[in-house]
Image: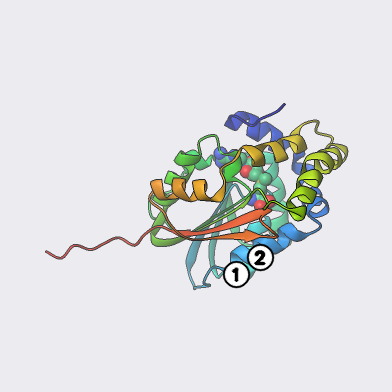
Amino acid sequence: MLVAANREEARRMFDAIAPTYDVLNRVLSFGVDALWRRRLIRTLQPLAGQRILDVACGTGDLLIGLSQEMPGSLVGLDLAPEMLQIAARRLRKAGVDGSLVRGAAECLPFASASFDVVSVAFGIRNFEDLSAGLREMHRVLRPGGQLRILEFSRPRRGLWGSLFTWYFVAVVPKIGRWISGHPEAYTYLPTSVAAFHDSDSLDQILRTAGLKVSASIPLTGGIATLTVAERPPSVLMAS
Ligand SMILES: C[S@@+](CC[C@H](N)C(=O)[O-])C[C@H]1O[C@@H](n2cnc3c(N)ncnc32)[C@H](O)[C@@H]1O
């Protein structure tokens, strides 16, 4: 079974599925993934001149949404050049003026405190080193800056949870393989979600990275979770 244990494997997998990534997102989630991203954007305050970084931006879905609601400068970063190429095309088509950078979340090529907002949607589960990725996001955020994380999670028990688990484990890999032509990427999806931290444990890791978590919002019965966090403002010492 494929597990994207390192960055090179993750890059290869996302490069391979890039051409069908968007269509599969819409088909497999029945369009709900777009609502989740919109929900993330709605938790942010639109302020003129903000500097926004979307980590693991993929094909640019969240960047395009952010550009419509948040005035400011936009940067997207991702490991996979094929995903970035599609993002570049989509941003151009949507008339979005953002920069795209190839790089890894664990060593962000940006100055400290250089962003007001950092977001990551369906990316952290794939990081080779989650703690390093979070430390880097903390570093590039200015004190008081906003962090938003959207990620799949395990739904609550009960009928909805059982139904979703069956769909995720039995149906998604088959449709994913059929449309993407990739033998393992859509088996990796439910496997990696099952192996990832639950929201309590993720919140703890965020706190250890120096971030303040103000809410963990379960979406669609807990299929996904939106984490609302910030880099705490710096405390000025009176002399
Ligand atoms: C499931 S896609 C999500 C893309 C996009 N954020 C979205 O909402 O559709 C995960 C993305 O994370 C990227 N990725 C995985 N590990 C990464 C890392 N360590 N640093 C930067 N990007 C990474 C992959 O290349 C891929 O484009």
Q: CA distance from mark 2 to mark 1?
A: 6 Å
Check the image and name the residue furthest to the left.
Answer: 239
Ligand 1: give its quadrant.
top right
Question: Toward which corner of the image does residue 93 lie, by quadrant?
Answer: bottom right
Q: Work out whether residue 73 or residue 140 is closer to the camera in this orientation and state it.
A: 140
| Quadrant, the C terminus | bottom left
Across and down, in percent, residue 44 comes to 54, 68
Q: Which residue is mark 2?
A: 38
At a point 55% along the width and 50% down the height, the residue shown is 199
Across and down, in percent, residue 172 comes to 81, 43
Horizontally, residue 35 falls left or right of residue 27, namely left
Horizontally, residue 206 falls left or right of residue 122, namely left
Check the image and name the residue furthest to the top.
Answer: 1
Q: Work out whether residue 98 or residue 181 is closer to the camera in this orientation and state it.
A: 181
| Mark 1, secondary structure of its residue | helix
Across and down, in percent, residue 114 comes to 41, 56
For badge 1, the amino acid type reads Arg
> As displayed, is residue 96 above or below residue 26?
below
Q: In this rendering, does residue 194 appear at all?
A: yes
Across and down, in percent, residue 206 comes to 45, 49
Q: Work out whether residue 114 or residue 233 is closer to the camera in this orientation and state it.
A: 233
Q: Which residue is mark 1?
A: 42
| Mark 2, secondary structure of its residue | helix
| Quadrant, the N terminus | top right
Q: Residues within 10 Å of mark 2 (few under 14, many from 20)?
A: some
Q: Are marks 2 and 1 in contact (CB under 8 Å)?
A: yes
Question: Toward which corner of the image does residue 38 lie, by quadrant?
Answer: bottom right
Q: Residues within 10 Å of mark 1 (few under 14, many from 20)?
A: few
Numbered badge on residue 208: none
At a point 70% along the width and 28% down the height, the residue shown is 2
Q: In this rendering, does residue 78 appear at all?
A: no
At a point 60% along the width and 69% down the height, the residue shown is 42
